[in-house]
């Protein structure tokens, strides 16, 4: 039979268990009240990209920015294969019903590749 010294341990253990159950019950619905995001240091690439997007596309904050890189040292995003894959990815995202808007570098590739002419005065 446990003595008086052991009874205190059981009380502490019981209170800790009740506290854990209470915290679990209280925290079970907290996910519904939280929003994604947080504090991003201003010097990070993510913060610079966020500023560039806010200034260049004032329609609101993006939920996802996808950055595609071209493998190889001499490859370019304007390379025929890379452009085809980029356009395919943009079409695939556009077809997804859960995506509200897609803005892609490759959407208007023809106008970027056209020669630029200066107006004569």
Image (spheres, rainbow, N blue to C red):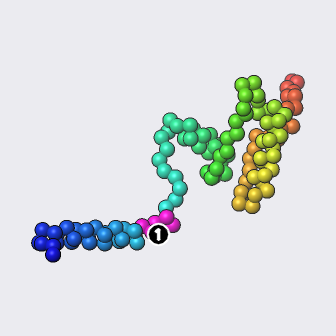
83 relative to 35 in the view: left or right: right
Residue occupying image coordinates x 49% and y 44%: 40
- The answer to whether residue 51 is seen in the rendering is no
Residue occupying image coordinates x 78% and y 42%: 86
Viewport quadrant of the C terminus? top right
Q: Tell me if residue 31 is in the magenta stretch.
A: yes
**Range covered by the magenta-colored residues:** 27-33
User: Which quadrant of the structure image shows residue 1?
Assistant: bottom left
> Residue 111: x percent and y percent?
85, 36
Mark 1 Cα within 10 Å, few/some/many (few <14, many 20+)?
Answer: few
Q: Tell me if residue 32 is in the magenta stretch.
A: yes
Question: Which of the two residues, 74 or 3, is positioned nearer the viewer here?
Answer: 3
Residue tagged 1: 29
> Residue 82: x percent and y percent?
79, 36
Residue occupying image coordinates x 31% and y 72%: 18
User: Which quadrant of the structure image shows residue 99?
Assistant: bottom right
112 relative to 41 in the view: left or right: right
18 relative to 87 in the view: left or right: left
């Amino acid at each position: 039979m446990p003595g008086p010294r052991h009874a205190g341990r059981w009380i502490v253990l019981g209170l800790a268990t009740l506290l854990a159950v209470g915290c679990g019950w209280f925290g079970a619905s907290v996910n519904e009240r939280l929003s994604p995001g947080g504090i991003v240091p201003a010097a990070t690439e993510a913060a610079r990209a966020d500023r560039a997007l806010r200034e260049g596309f004032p329609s609101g904050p993006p939920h996802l920015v996808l950055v595609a890189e071209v493998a190889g040292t001499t490859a370019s995003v304007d390379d025929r294969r890379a452009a085809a894959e980029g356009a395919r990815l943009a079409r695939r995202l556009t077809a997804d019903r859960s995506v509200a808007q897609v803005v892609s570098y490759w959407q208007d590739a023809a106008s970027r590749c056209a020669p630029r002419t200066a107006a004569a005065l």
